[in-house]
Image (spheres, rainbow, N blue to C red):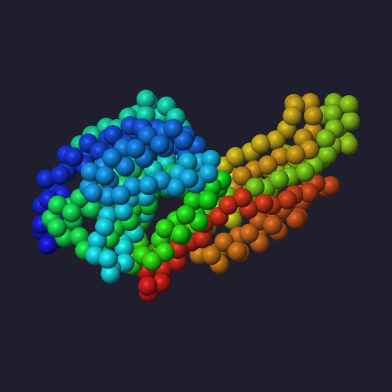
């Protein structure tokens, strides 16, 4: 059976490349609803060609969740295939570096994370259909805001709802350590806003009255970054800073947005404690800091069931 599937997919290799090129060459950052919809339309057409029923569920301002279902034997629970069509790359990236093949490598925005994974999933379904090997129903769920951790949407709830009753779940995104292996665990992530409040004053006329929120945050960023422990799977990235109003005004407010990754949910809880402790012990007197978790996705810790 596996030889049949392998031989069939080798025959379909050029078609797989063609579909990959088509969706890679569409800019689809998480906040580009038009680009997301264009990718969804291409994928929907492929699904319908395979005999799948397609629908889209509105997930809020970030777009939609595309769902394709292939019928199977009614008494069997479906296999769930999961993926995302958004990328981290801004609009116009395709113009700068479109899909390209050099030697045995493909390049282009989203080439690893994770548009070819969607193609692999669709052609897996195609192989099962063409070779008449499909018994279980298959449901493919493709989201539009994974790179934003479903921050401004109800995508998380849609995924949970659509996965109910599934027999098995398989995510089509490649594993970082070895893309040829199936991953049975995955790090979680959260976005944390750290907001420092100081006291504004004119830097020329009365600097002694000011309390610089930016200087306080500079001290905190060094401490926050030091929480990273790559060997343990922990990374704290101070990815954005917003603050200040003028070169001549001591700033009274500044924010950094942290991208935090962790291997276990216990690490996550400990990280939050340490972030809050850093915020609660200022270096610049008379400054205060608030910590807000904007969004989070739990880690998938390895279990015997996985």
Q: Toward which corner of the image does residue 24 lie, by quadrant?
A: top left
Q: Quadrant of the N terminus?
A: bottom left
Q: Is residue 202 above or below residue 179?
A: above
Which residue corresponds to the image point at 75% horizontal and 55% vertical from the top-left? Answer: 280
Q: Toward which corner of the image does residue 215 lie, by quadrant?
A: top right
Which residue corresponds to the image point at 16% horizontal and 39% vertical from the top-left? Answer: 14
**Most foreground residue, 216 or 70:** 70
Q: Toward which corner of the image does residue 198 lie, by quadrant?
A: top right
Which residue corresponds to the image point at 53% horizontal and 40% vertical from the top-left? Answer: 61
Residue 136 position, x and y percent, is 25, 63
Residue 190 position, x and y percent, is 56, 53
Question: Residue lying furthest bottom in this view?
Answer: 304
Q: Is residue 297 left or right of residue 92?
A: right
* Residue 152 shows up from this direction: yes
Residue 181 position, x and y percent, is 29, 59
Which residue corresponds to the image point at 28% horizontal and 40% vertical from the top-left? Answer: 45
Labels in figure, total: 0
**Most foreground residue, 286 or 119:** 119
* Residue 212 shows up from this direction: no
Q: Is residue 244 left or right of residue 62?
A: right
Q: Quadrant of the C terminus?
A: bottom left
**Most foreground residue, 259 or 62:** 62
Residue 197 position, x and y percent, is 77, 43
């Amino acid at each position: 059976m596996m030889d049949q599937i392998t031989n069939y997919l080798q025959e379909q290799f050029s078609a797989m490349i063609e579909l990959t090129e088509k969706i890679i060459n569409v800019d689809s950052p998480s906040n580009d609803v038009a680009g997301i919809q264009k990718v969804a339309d291409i994928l929907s057409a492929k699904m319908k060609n395979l005999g799948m029923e397609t629908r889209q569920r509105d997930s809020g301002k970030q777009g939609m969740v595309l769902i394709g279902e292939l019928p199977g034997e009614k008494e069997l629970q479906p296999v769930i295939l999961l993926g995302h069509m958004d990328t981290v790359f801004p609009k116009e990236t395709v113009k700068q570096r479109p899909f390209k093949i050099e030697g045995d490598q493909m390049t282009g925005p989203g080439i690893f994370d994770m548009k070819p994974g969607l193609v692999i999933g669709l052609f897996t379904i195609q192989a099962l259909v063409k070779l008449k090997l499909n018994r279980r129903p298959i449901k493919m769920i493709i989201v539009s805001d994974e790179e934003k951790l479903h921050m401004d949407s109800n995508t998380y709830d849609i995924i949970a709802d659509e996965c109910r009753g599934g027999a098995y779940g398989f995510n089509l995104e490649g594993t970082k350590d070895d893309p040829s292996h199936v991953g049975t665990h995955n790090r979680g992530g959260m976005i944390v806003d750290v907001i420092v409040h100081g006291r504004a004053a004119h830097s020329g006329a009365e600097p002694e009255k000011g309390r610089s929120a930016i200087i306080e945050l500079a001290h905190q960023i060094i401490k926050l970054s030091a929480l990273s422990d790559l060997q343990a799977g922990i990374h704290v990235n101070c990815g954005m800073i917003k603050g200040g109003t003028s070169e001549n005004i001591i700033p009274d407010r500044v924010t950094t947005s942290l991208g935090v990754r962790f291997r276990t949910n216990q690490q996550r809880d400990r990280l939050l404690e340490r972030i809050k402790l850093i915020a609660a012990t200022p270096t610049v007197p008379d400054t205060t800091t608030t910590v807000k978790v904007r969004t989070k996705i739990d880690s998938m810790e390895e279990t015997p069931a996985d």
